[in-house]
Image: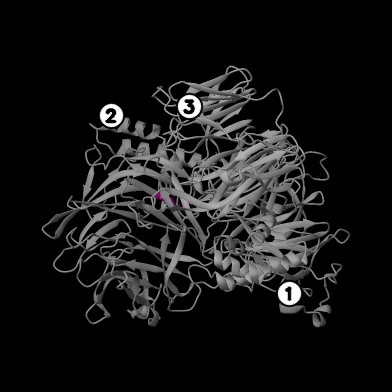
Amino acid sequence: MFLYNLTLQRATGISFAIHGNFSGTKQQEIVVSRGKILELLRPDPNTGKVHTLLTVEVFGVIRSLMAFRLTGGTKDYIVVGSDSGRIVILEYQPSKNMFEKIHQETFGKSGCRRIVPGQFLAVDPKGRAVMISAIEKQKLVYILNRDAAARLTISSPLEAHKANTLVYHVVGVDVGFENPMFACLEMDYEEADNDPTGEAAANTQQTLTFYELDLGLNHVVRKYSEPLEEHGNFLITVPGGSDGPSGVLICSENYITYKNFGDQPDIRCPIPRRRNDLDDPERGMIFVCSATHKTKSMFFFLAQTEQGDIFKITLETDEDMVTEIRLKYFDTVPVAAAMCVLKTGFLFVASEFGNHYLYQIAHLGDDDEEPEFSSAMPLEEGDTFFFQPRPLKNLVLVDELDSLSPILFCQIADLANEDTPQLYVACGRGPRSSLRVLRHGLEVSEMAVSELPGNPNAVWTVRRHIEDEFDAYIIVSFVNATLVLSIGEDCGRRDDALVQVYPDGIRHIRADKRVNEWKTPGKKTIVKLVYFEMDPSGQLNEYTERKEMSADVVCMSLANVPPGEQRSRFLAVGLVDNTVRIISLDPSDCLQPLSMQALPAQPESLCIVEMGGTEKQDELGERGSIGFLYLNIGLQNGVLLRTVLDPVTGDLSDTRTRYLGSRPVKLFRVRMQGQEAVLAMSSRSWLSYSYQSRFHLTPLSYETLEFASGFASEQCPEGIVAISTNTLRILALEKLGAVFNQVAFPLQYTPRKFVIHPESNNLIIIETDHNAYTEATKAQRKQQMAEEMVEAAGEDERELAAEMAAAFLNENLPESIFGAPKAGNGQWASVIRVMNPIQGNTLDLVQLEQNEAAFSVAVCRFSNTGDDWYVLVGVAKDLILNPRSVAGGFVYTYKLVNNGEKLEYLHKTPVEEVPAAIAPFQGRVLIGVGKLLRVYDLGKKKLLRKCENKHIANYISGIQTIGHRVIVSDVQESFIWVRYKRNENQLIIFADDTYPRWVTTASLLDYDTVAGADKFGNICVVRLPPNTNDEVDEDPTGNKALWDRGLLNGASQKAEVIMNYHVGETVLSLQKTTLIPGGSESLVYTTLSGGIGILVPFTSHEDHDFFQHVEMHLRSEHPPLCGRDHLSFRSYYFPVKNVIDGDLCEQFNSMEPNKQKNVSEELDRTPPEVSKKLEDIRTRYAF
């Protein structure tokens, strides 16, 4: 079995975000890393929408990211620290839309290791040096400069190693143009290591250490080091030189401290806490991320606490000494992994979990009522300030980037009866979690919908003047009339000429309302072609010769006039005899046929577009794109053909086909992201467009449209105006490149698993959060705090305190924004929810008690109770994760009543350990209780134990059943095959795996084969050899043990590994399914970072051979961007076996044309043939 890996939706969680002017213009851009992906985003300063310019897979783990600019430069470079053992400096090339690798310096082994640098990066704020550090021991400094041709140069590395030292964070200190300085949070563990009593370990302090790069001597000195009182978690550079006082802010538990050398005293200020917080009062509070904003005259920092509250931090200075730190509550946004303040006044928040946001900073919060806290205010040691959280006041949300991260569970099914299955994805964490329904398609935003006085048959938009940026009129055509609607405020005169075509002829309406008409000779249907040109004086001229065609003409298309030309070169004509002809419009050989192509059915419409080019500016500065000409042909049987049209000879070649729907396909040319695209309408509407050097053909998630035209106005520069029955709609497509459109339904806690009730199609979801309160406990805590507030007040303040307590009880801040209170270790909250997946409404909600955590759920029937459906939920009681202890567990049994809409509680069955897996089995149920595998049946008062097996190694994390076989996944020891013997009532282990795998999820492929994923990001397929015997007996006498011990102390029979593959993100769900109607089966996986991918089998040997060669050539010709070796990345834990990486193969399309040519010649093909093969395997299984 050979498989091909394809990513359908790239990971959406962001681990790092940096901002700068990467394209060298004044525009601010953001570079984000999503695990193994680098992405360049550009927020549009006018609309606030975030556009993705470029996404690149780097096939390596990005561990750190920094923007870097040479002194006096205008362009930012990107420095990447990864697991490749190399430092890589990239530059964004806007003309080619690619990241170019400028430097790649090797310094160590590959992999994420303790002492190999790459985990931390720091740059000198003046752009002279960069430090790359490991978690322990090694630090390297590279000096960056420019040569005579203004290219970036890099020095050999200077070492700043110190053994036995752990590093927590590194930043560059802003010292103006003095010698570059780096500050590190370090801890020396040498004494703790050598002291057996453990006293030294308890007394070890963190230190703040400054390293100076002496540019004169060209080496690094450890300049100064001092111990810290609190444990710091990160540093913030304070602007220096002429801009500020220099130094660093240390963010530590409960405090923020300013330090600098010299006579500067430490200034320290406590981190303010929320007033009346339900959190455990003993819990410390830390800042988790920060962003700095600096202008010529001032600077400030925004720092976010782990509850999501942002504080604006400013420093008061006297000459060059800092006298106080001031903190002011700014706003609360979801907890971020990274924040960027852009020069354009936006705040980009890359959320730790869930959607990412772009806010506009509307106010700086200088003149509001909010209290300002200062380090100069007197406080007792250990006390802090309090503030009141509130809804957004200084920030305004302008854009939201959908993110599925983290996907905890996913099932694919067609519950809405739409032919194409939907993906039901449980994602998010805590109060921000949601159940999302994903459908393949582009999201459509409705800008306007208006009713029309009848059913129109067509719509067009017209500009006043050819040079206008926006359209001025919408023209709606009815059978007997034409309606002209004006767009915008100015309803004035027409400045340019229009041409109106009607059944008997053509009218040309001049700007001054004069009309020229041309009548068709007689009542013929179309057999002739007549060509008109507008001459410079504005007359409509008929070309002298007419062209007789051999059959009736059904459709025609002219290409757009290329920039700098007078006329378009080609006319495409579709005829009744199932052919398309290309006809020249060149004055020298006008209306001469150039080429023709036979079609499988009659054409319905044609459209010539120029696509796939990169934007270029010609000599005059006119923007245009130099792409390829494509002729799109829509057939009457619902098929779309795309053919390459040679711009010189007019030849047609390289045809691709896709079936779009049951109606004839109509085509319309529209503009998307500055390039031409084609809107194709059949029973669904599709958009064919080029995005990041790949063609996409995506359906619109919208009702059927009948006719459309491109539309441009100030509010909506790239819209579509369309008609559907008797309405006129103006639509915009903003999320190009997205594969799925999402509908999200909010949940209360983190969803762990869900099952689908087969009869009603309702979902039964279990949601569980650690470190959380249930609703009941929360209400109780609030009540208790309110009573304490009243009791603590004196006689004269009673009334005021009672009012405050009442206000406190009434205030209800939404937890999805302000976060849920942290209850402490070992506190759990859970609910069981029954949800209708189509409307998204909750039909029933069962709250479990405090510290009961639901871990598993199953829906099943028991053979002794007829047709009733039961839901079983496995719950742990008082589970403490570290050190692990559990007070036991329960299996709750509910009966589904009211057609699967309500849970009726039957009983709960106590068990000794956590019931982490439940599966229906032959009219009974299998439950994994800790490491015991048991069969239970339904009883009146509880579930009755029928049979058990005690020989599973650690902890059962999943159970799959097929026939008499049970495949158990162990948390650490891969798969164990168990046979249930009905007659003896025994569960007997008959086979297992030879590798340890920390299985997270598994899926059966057939009777002998199982696919599984582990927590390190690998997917494997394991199969029992053909001679496996599952008729083995248990051996009570012990005789057999002497001669059949089995390999590695396990079962006597071992499974074989069919395939291994490292995805690079933890996979939490696997399912074998078909994604498109009529497609073949594929194995779909979803990852913790929000990625969705598929593994598809090859059907023929030559296909496999071809893709193997493509992958081999790309590994050598197009190595990964961050210097990691592709083969070793895909073999991180196990050597990659029988899988070809489609993500690498598809980078063929973004290679340079000459490299494409070399690779395809090695394969005895042409570049279009190779990209056609890549597209075909994708569309055969998915989208």
Q: Is residue 1005 above or below residue 853?
A: below
Between disc 3 and disc 2, the foreground one is 3
SS at badge 2: helix
Residue drawn at (56%, 68%), measured in percent from left and top?
1155
| Closer to the camera in the image, 602 or 104 | 602
For image coordinates 84% across by 67% down, the residue present is 1030
- Which residue of the protein is positioned furthest toward the left in this rendering? 319
Q: Position of residue 912 (x, y in %)?
A: 65, 57
Q: For the residue marked with disc 2, what is the amino acid?
A: Glu
Q: Say which amino acid is labelled 3.
A: Tyr
Lower sequence index among marks 3 and 2: 3
Which residue is labeled 1 in the image? 1050
Image location of residue 294, percent across then percent down = 25, 53
Residue occupied by mark 2: 799
- Range of residues picked out in magenta: 349-353
Q: Residue furthest front?
A: 544
